[in-house]
């Protein structure tokens, strides 16, 4: 009896570990959907509308991966995660990938058993203050109370910056970015700090957006990108190159509306990207049309950017660092060939 | 031993050792312990191997690295240059603080409301019933949100604070109190407080003895209060008032100096106290109702006043029912204090399992340490209350 129990338990423990280490790519193909960790709601990056449909620049990375792997960008299961939950959810296999405005840092890349698959948005930390405060620079904020989201790189950068400038502050930490906004709105803190893109998103969510302003200073580098588990290289490659295909499509001037035409009549590079020639798809373990599916269903990086955070959205963020490398930005895809 | 009805062993052949019931019991228990130990070992080694193979770092080395983030409220010296172990201590102390405040307040509220249920005053009696029914039936998290987002968030900004004599200020950032700073000579005052407390104990024993021997009752409460207030006051005056007050002052954005009670602490402590107080009130009511009515009638017939009946007859007998229930209410209170994370009060759960875990990624180590801490706190409460329980039960049997 006891022996049976021991053996069953042993089997259970070993069994669990084995399923967790199996290939994520096969799991996703078998399941027919990508399980993607997103934020609990951040305008422009990952947010749910009243019909329950997710959209945003991070959501589009999930959709690109689903399009590449399953041929259908709608086959995504979104799991909203707080900043505190996100890495554990990925490590434990609860989600296949994380696309949740997550900053790529050495510690996270090296010690958490995770791999960053690229950068889909170059961000930096900024500050939002109430206009009535009469402050024009971060350096006037000595003694301020600062609302901040717990478990972020922002929390660390803030401490570094204020210490380096010999200023004091009070950190008031909340679980979600919505809570930081209500803390800021109720006057619990003078300043809200976060990645600049988030500040714009949070600002338009205020009751009176015109009463607040974003200070000009950017105090950190925040490269945001999708994350996968370490040690599953096939899946890592799929996510990495799905993101690259979005960026490469913009570089090659392939859009969602021109993709089907260019697949047959485009330049050799365009035809190779869209799977008419070459064998990039089979090397990744995917359909030859993987990148074609991404571009035709999700669009290229420029379309994704403008639709979610750029001119086509309420945020109206300029491309800036996120422009292509040959247009003054640093967005650069490694060659797909 | 053998009583004739059971078959006895034939003489000369002792039972085989494996048929010896004592041996068998021990053997199987040993087997079980080994089995469980092996299972635990297997789980731990398997977890470690899996984490190793996935490149997740393990171990407690992270405790000595610099944390790099600040914490809203710290009872000990802490800033961003301190280590993760210090964040553990800061969180632990904040948890103990809110737990201690909650236990004291909820006990006071609970006993007042529990006794009020038996009041002959209709209004007071109804108040007790309404209080218990409202606060016992609303989820605690909702109550915390109510106090934090509805009540405290309605307070004015720092510049428009409510103030009392330019010493106390209340605004949305918290309650600001003057801080007592002791100067040389303050030792005498602290000593006098200790002396007063010892004096009260001596007075109590002496008064009890006097009553037993001579039947004379002393006004113990009034004498104790006089001792507690008079002695330190005298010492303060004698040593030339060895204190200065550090008043909070509005400088720049916020008040500086003095003591700040953050609104997160107020909301959490109030919510926990009122919620748990409702359960304690019910425990007190149950305890009092468990005392047979004949006891009260008997007491009345020998001419005791109502207040004396409560104090001398009912409460001592009710305690044996109340104390075990108090024990579990206190433990729930400590566990419920982890809801702090919803409003950002920096308790152990928010700071250590929240921020520290997220910055280091050492989930297993941190969760394990935190589990051990809550276990230890609740075991301490349990032992203390069991000890107290044995005291009240013994007193009853005399």
Image (cartoon, grey):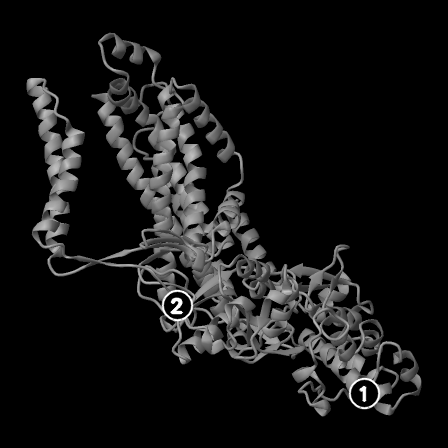
Q: Nearer the viewer, residue A307 or A40?
A: A307
Q: Residue at x 16, y 41 (%)?
A: B229
Mark 2 neighbour density, 10 Å: few (under 14) some (14–19) many (20 or more):
many
Is any atom of residue A322 visible in this view?
yes
Determine which quarter of the picture holds residue A260. Answer: bottom right
Residue B37, given in percent of the width and then of the height, sits at: 42, 53
Q: Is residue B88 above or below residue B114?
A: below
Residue behind mark 1 = A252
Q: Nearer the viewer, residue A294 or B337?
A: B337
Q: Is residue B104 above or below residue B80?
A: above
Q: Are marks 2 and 1 on the same chain?
A: no
Q: Nearer the viewer, residue A204 or B361?
A: A204
Residue B355, given in percent of the width and then of the height, sits at: 47, 64
Q: Is residue B204 above or below residue A319?
A: above
Q: Residue at x 48, y 75 (%)?
A: A157
Residue behind mark 2 = B84
Q: Residue at x 53, y 66 (%)?
A: A132
Chain for numbered disc 2: B
For this view, does A170 lie left or right of residue A9? left
Residue A46, given in percent of the width and then of the height, sits at: 68, 65
Q: Residue furthest top?
A: B301
Determine which quarter of the picture holds residue A275. Answer: bottom right
Chain for numbered disc 1: A
């Amino acid at each position: 009896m006891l022996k049976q129990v021991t053996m069953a338990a042993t089997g259970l423990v070993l069994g669990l570990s084995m399923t967790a280490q199996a290939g994520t790519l096969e799991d996703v193909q078998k399941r027919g959907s990508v399980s993607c960790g997103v934020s609990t709601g951040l305008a422009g990056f990952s947010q749910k509308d009243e019909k329950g449909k997710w959209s945003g620049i991070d959501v589009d990375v999930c959709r690109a991966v689903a399009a590449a792997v399953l041929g259908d960008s709608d086959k995504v299961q979104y799991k909203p995660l707080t900043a505190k939950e996100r890495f554990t959810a990925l490590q434990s296999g609860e989600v296949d990938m994380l696309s949740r405005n997550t900053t790529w840092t050495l510690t996270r890349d090296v010690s958490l058993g995770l791999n960053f698959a690229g950068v889909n948005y170059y961000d930096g930390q900024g500050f939002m203050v109430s206009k009535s405060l009469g402050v024009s620079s971060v350096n006037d904020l000595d003694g301020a109370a600062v609302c901040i989201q717990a478990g972020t790189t922002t929390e660390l950068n803030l401490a570094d910056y204020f210490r380096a400038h010999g200023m004091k502050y009070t950190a008031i930490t909340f679980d979600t970015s919505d809570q930081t906004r209500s803390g800021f709105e109720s006057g619990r803190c003078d300043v809200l700090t976060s990645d600049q893109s988030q500040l714009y998103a949070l600002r338009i969510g205020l009751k009176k957006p015109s009463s607040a302003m974003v200070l000009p200073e950017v105090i950190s580098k925040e490269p945001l990108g999708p994350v996968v588990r370490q040690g599953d290289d096939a899946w890592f490659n799929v996510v990495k190159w799905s993101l690259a295909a979005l960026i490469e499509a913009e570089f090659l001037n392939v859009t969602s509306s021109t993709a089907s035409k260019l697949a047959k009549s485009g330049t050799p590079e365009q035809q190779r990207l869209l799977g008419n020639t070459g064998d990039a798809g089979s090397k990744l373990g995917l359909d030859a049309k993987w990148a074609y599916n991404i571009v035709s269903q999700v669009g290229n990086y420029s379309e994704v950017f403008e639709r979610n955070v750029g001119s086509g959205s309420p945020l109206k963020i300029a491309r800036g660092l996120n422009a292509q490398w040959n247009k003054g930005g640093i967005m650069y895809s490694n060659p797909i060939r | 031993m053998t009583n004739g009805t059971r078959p006895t062993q034939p003489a000369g052949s002792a039972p085989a050792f494996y048929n010896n019931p004592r041996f068998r019991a021990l053997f199987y228990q040993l087997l079980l312990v080994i089995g469980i130990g092996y299972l635990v070992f297997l789980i731990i080694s398997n977890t470690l191997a899996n984490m190793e193979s996935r490149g997740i770092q393990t171990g407690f080395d992270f405790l000595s690295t610099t944390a790099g983030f600040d914490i809203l409220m710290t009872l000990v010296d802490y800033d961003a240059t301190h280590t993760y172990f210090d964040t553990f201590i800061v969180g632990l102390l904040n948890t103990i603080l809110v737990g201690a405040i909650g236990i004291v307040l909820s006990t006071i509220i609970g006993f007042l409301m529990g006794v009020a249920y038996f009041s002959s005053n209709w209004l007071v009696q109804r108040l007790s019933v309404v209080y218990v029914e409202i606060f016992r039936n609303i989820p605690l998290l909702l109550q915390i949100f109510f106090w934090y987002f509805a009540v405290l968030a309605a307070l004015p900004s720092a510049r428009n604070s409510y103030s009392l004599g330019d010493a106390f200020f209340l605004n949305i950032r918290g309650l600001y109190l003057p801080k007592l700073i002791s100067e040389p000579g303050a030792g005498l005052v602290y000593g006098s407080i200790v002396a007063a407390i010892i004096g009260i104990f001596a007075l109590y024993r002496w008064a009890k003895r006097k009553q037993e021997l001579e039947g004379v009752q002393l006004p113990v409460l009034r004498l104790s209060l006089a001792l507690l207030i008079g002695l330190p006051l005298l010492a303060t005056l004698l040593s030339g008032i060895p204190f200065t007050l550090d008043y909070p002052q509005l400088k720049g954005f916020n008040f500086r100096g003095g003591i700040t009670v953050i609104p997160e602490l107020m909301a959490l402590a109030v919510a926990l106290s009122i919620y748990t107080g409702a359960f304690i009130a019910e425990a007190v009511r149950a305890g009092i109702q468990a005392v047979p009515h004949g006891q009260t009638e008997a007491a009345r017939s020998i001419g005791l006043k109502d207040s004396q009946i409560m104090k001398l007859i009912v409460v001592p007998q009710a305690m044996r029912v109340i104390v075990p229930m108090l024990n579990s209410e206190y433990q729930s209170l400590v566990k419920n204090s982890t809801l702090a994370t919803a409003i950002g009060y920096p308790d152990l759960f928010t700071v250590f399992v929240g921020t520290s875990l997220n910055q280091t990624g050492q989930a297993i180590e941190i969760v394990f340490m935190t589990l051990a801490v809550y276990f230890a706190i609740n075991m301490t409460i349990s032992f203390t209350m069991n000890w107290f329980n044995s005291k009240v039960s013994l007193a009853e049997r005399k």
